[in-house]
């Protein structure tokens, strides 16, 4: 089975991995490990493990310093037979973007979403995404298509300074373009970072997304702390195979999995991580249920919950989804003129755009990711039971309430 192998090499080797000009390979880190076939094409990833963080709890006795993860395959019975002392083996499930299609016609269009997001009010406050990086981990972005549909230019960065290897639009398919379009409804002037983790024509693994997040974290931490602003939109989910529930190497319910630790590290560095809650009865699991990520369910433009939107509880954090945003509207036409922008992937992108708009004037140094998530939950429009429920989370995003809360915060800080 495909696995991630976590170990702690010498401090010198960990330091060499941090050097952007370095050439440390998987064999340098884990060569000669019995029972493991290394994937030599996968560059080792450094995963920080901060002391005192609840998510640093782990099944093996390894240091609180940074660990290193490589990718490989082992026998199917291998996860319970560790290849060496001090080594942890974790699941590396496949990931996929699953657009919801065939679930009925569009309900409203993107101009309705623009109105509901109070984009005019956001822009009047100077909240339009200008200067904010919005990373889309998906299938790739066709920027020209998104620009035509929006009727305005789109700033699309190849991601070179963020460690991306693909050119804008390369291998782009509908799902990534849909996500980019939907994010730009609120954050018209954000700079899109195209990270085509789910490139068409090849299977994608959780480790591919881990590598992308690691590059984002490294680049973000190199920026001035006072002006950091990065939003990461994730419209994908993990699929089988995972290890059984309760297994220390599993992903979906395991806070100690390297990917879940990386989400925590990004949050600590000042990034806002947004995940689709999931669709069609899939559990809200793994990073989609992470306590330091915003998990987004889907409602239509009338505020009604879309039946395919996954319900809580979440596996890492029970109170998921956090909020709902809009989906199933006529928007990007990325799958054809008659296909809506559907699924919680669309809703997550809409929410990511709203977060990016806020970040225009409120970088993480002024409003931490945790504070912004709390603000989104506190101002959400309740759609069902009083307070939180597993259908809507805390309710639908309420940009007018967000603006009012930010105005109060600015006055109090003056």
Image: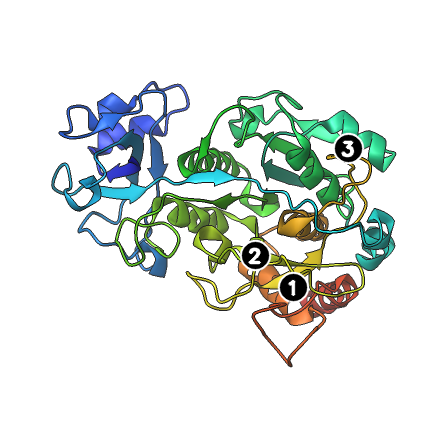
Could you tell me which residue is drawn at 59 percent across and 66 percent down? 374
Q: Nearer the viewer, residue 271 or 102?
A: 102
Q: Say which label, 2 or 1, has the lower sequence index.
A: 2
Q: Count of labels shown?
A: 3
28 lies above or below 118: above
Q: CA distance from mark 2 to mark 3?
A: 25 Å
Q: Secondary structure at mark 1?
A: helix
Mark before the other along the chain sequence, 2 or 3: 3
Residue bearing mark 3: 146
Image position, residue 410 (x, y; %): 72, 64
Q: Earlier in the sequence, mark 1 or mark 3?
A: 3
Q: Nearer the viewer, mark 1 or mark 3?
A: 3
Quadrant holding the C terminus: bottom right
Asked if one can make out residue 377 in the rendered structure from this viewpoint, the answer is yes
Q: Secondary structure at mark 2?
A: strand
Q: Is residue 81 left or right of residue 152?
A: left
Q: Quadrant of residue 141?
A: top right
Number of residues whose C-alpha sits closer than 10 Å to that of mark 1, classed few (under 14), some (14–19) or many (20 or more)? many
Quadrant location of the N terminus in the rendered image: top left
Q: Which mark is residue 294?
A: 2
Residue 129, visible in the rendered structure: no
Which element carries disc 3, helix, strand or loop?
A: helix
Q: Which label number is shown at residue 194? A: none
In the picture, measured across the screen, residue 96 lies left or right of residue 249, that is right
Contact, mark 1 vs mark 3 (Cβ under 8 Å): no
Instruction: Using a 10 Å C-alpha cutoff, classify the residue at mark 2 as few (fewer than 14 neighbours), some (14 to 19) or many (20 or more).
Output: many
Crowding near the residue tagged with mark 3, few <14, some 14–19, many ≥20 C-alpha atoms within 10 Å: many
Measure the alpha-carbon separation of dots 2 and 1. Answer: 9 Å
What residue is disc 1 on?
376
The single residue placed furthest to the bottom in the displayed view is 386
- Percent from the top left, x then y, of residue 82? 15, 41
Q: Relative to 41, does residue 83 appear above or below in the rendering?
A: below
């Amino acid at each position: 089975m495909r696995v991630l192998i976590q170990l702690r090499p010498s401090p010198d080797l960990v330091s060499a991995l941090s050097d952007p000009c370095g050439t440390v390979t998987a064999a340098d880190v884990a060569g000669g490990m019995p029972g493991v076939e290394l994937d030599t094409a996968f560059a080792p990833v450094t995963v920080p493990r901060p002391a005192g963080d609840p998510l640093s709890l782990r099944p093996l006795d390894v240091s609180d310093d940074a660990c290193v993860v490589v990718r490989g395959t082992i026998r199917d019975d291998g996860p319970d037979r560790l290849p060496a002392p001090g080594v942890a083996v974790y699941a590396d499930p496949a990931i996929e973007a699953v657009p919801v299609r065939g679930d009925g016609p569009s309900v409203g269009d993107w101009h309705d979403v623009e109105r509901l997001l109070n984009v005019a009010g956001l822009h009047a406050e100077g909240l339009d995404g200008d200067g904010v990086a919005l990373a889309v981990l998906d299938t790739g972005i066709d920027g020209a298509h998104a620009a035509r549909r929006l009727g305005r230019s789109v700033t699309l960065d190849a991601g070179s300074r963020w460690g991306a290897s693909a050119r804008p639009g390369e291998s782009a398919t509908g799902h990534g373009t849909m996500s980019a379009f939907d994010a730009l409804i609120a954050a018209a002037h954000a700079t899109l970072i195209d990270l085509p983790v789910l490139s068409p024509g090849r299977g994608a693994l959780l480790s591919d997304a881990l590598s992308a997040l690691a590059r984002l974290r490294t680049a973000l931490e190199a920026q001035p702390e006072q002006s950091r602003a990065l939003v990461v939109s994730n419209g994908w989910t993990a699929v089988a195979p995972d290890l059984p529930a309760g297994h220390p190497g599993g992903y979906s319910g395991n806070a100690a999995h390297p990917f879940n630790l990386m989400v925590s590290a990004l949050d600590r560095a000042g990034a806002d991580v947004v995940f689709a809650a999931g669709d069609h009865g899939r559990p809200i699991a793994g990073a989609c249920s992470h306590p330091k990520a915003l998990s987004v369910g889907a409602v239509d433009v009338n505020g009604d919950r879309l039946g395919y939107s996954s319900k809580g509880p979440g596996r890492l954090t029970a109170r998921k989804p956090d909020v709902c945003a809009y989906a199933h509207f006529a928007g990007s036409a990325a799958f054809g003129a008659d296909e809506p922008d559907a699924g919680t992937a669309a809703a997550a992108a809409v929410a990511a755009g709203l977060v990016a708009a806020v970040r225009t004037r409120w970088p993480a140094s002024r409003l931490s990711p945790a504070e912004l998530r709390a603000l989104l939950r506190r101002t959400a429009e309740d759609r069902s039971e009083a307070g939180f429920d597993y259908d809507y989370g805390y309710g639908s995003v309420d940009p007018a309430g967000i603006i009012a809360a930010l105005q109060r915060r600015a006055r109090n800080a003056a």
